[in-house]
Image: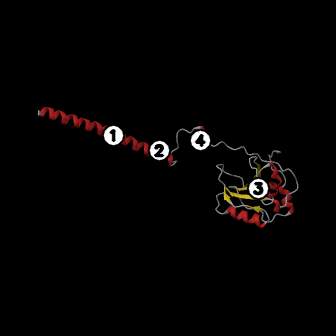
Amino acid sequence: MNTSLINNRKAYRNKIKRRQTIIFGTLGISLAILLFVNTLFWLNLVAFPYQPGFSKPVPKEVVYACSPTDKPVDPTEISARVYNAGGEAGLAAKVTQSLTDAGVITGEAANWVDTEEVTDAVRLITNKENLAKAYSLRGFFPDAKVILDNTNKTQVVDVVIGTAWKAMTITPTAEEFTAGMQSTAGCVKP
């Protein structure tokens, strides 16, 4: 065989190998850089430059409901579920136990799973039919806001302990129950 033909073939193979090394090396380095940058975005170490509108949660309209009556409901006629949105571990369980000791029918305590942060001390969330019960619970939580939720079809008042939580009244007096029946500022008649 001709040696120049063999040398030309070796030169061509070397040229192809160099080209493949450059192409695959460039692709590999590019993918490594993309992986690094995307990892920074994923770990929230760098803010993503584009925020599509559909990924932002739509804020819920909060309607503070007015009290339908001035007469409190007996605590033994109230059913409540307590949720912890304040961050203190075991807070919902303590409040549930205190309400149970006062005669309120309670379910299991749980953590608040809604994406909205609860900055109030306490939110009492209920439907139109249970507004008097929710306002009666304000005897235990004088700073509570009563929120109307028409999607709630149960007879249970949701007690959501927020980040501004301080304490509850363990054994409210008749005057504290009556004071709790006063409508909160900015409320809407249901």
Q: Earlier in the sequence, mark 2 or mark 4?
A: 2
Q: Which mark is residue 38?
A: 2
User: Disc 1 versus disc 4: distance between alpha carbons?
Assistant: 36 Å
Kind of residue sitting beneath label 4: Ser
Label 3 packing within 10 angstroms: few (<14), some (14-19), many (20+): many
Residue 75 versus residue 55 in the image, above or below: below
Q: Position of residue 50 (x, y in %)?
A: 54, 38
Kind of residue sitting beneath label 2: Asn
Q: Earlier in the sequence, mark 1 or mark 2?
A: 1
Q: Is residue 21 left or right of residue 43?
A: left
Res 157 quadrant in image: bottom right
Residue 151 visible in the current orientation: yes
Which mark's residue is nearer the viewer, 1 or 2? 1
Kind of residue sitting beneath label 1: Phe
Residue for badge 1: 24
Q: Position of residue 28 (x, y in %)?
A: 36, 42
User: Disc 3 versus disc 4: distance between alpha carbons?
Assistant: 32 Å
User: Disc 1 versus disc 2: distance between alpha carbons?
Assistant: 21 Å
Q: Earlier in the sequence, mark 3 or mark 4?
A: 4
User: Disc 1 versus disc 3: distance between alpha carbons?
Assistant: 64 Å
Q: Position of residue 25 (x, y in %)?
A: 33, 41
**Residue depicted at 22% across the width and 34% down the height:** 12
Kind of residue sitting beneath label 3: Val
* Observer-nearest of 27 and 178: 27
Residue for badge 3: 156
Q: Which mark is residue 55?
A: 4
Q: Quadrant of the N terminus?
A: top left
Q: Earlier in the sequence, mark 1 or mark 4?
A: 1
Disc 3 and disc 4 in contact, CB within 8 angstroms: no
Label 2 packing within 10 angstroms: few (<14), some (14-19), many (20+): some
**Residue depicted at 75% across the width and 58% down the height:** 80
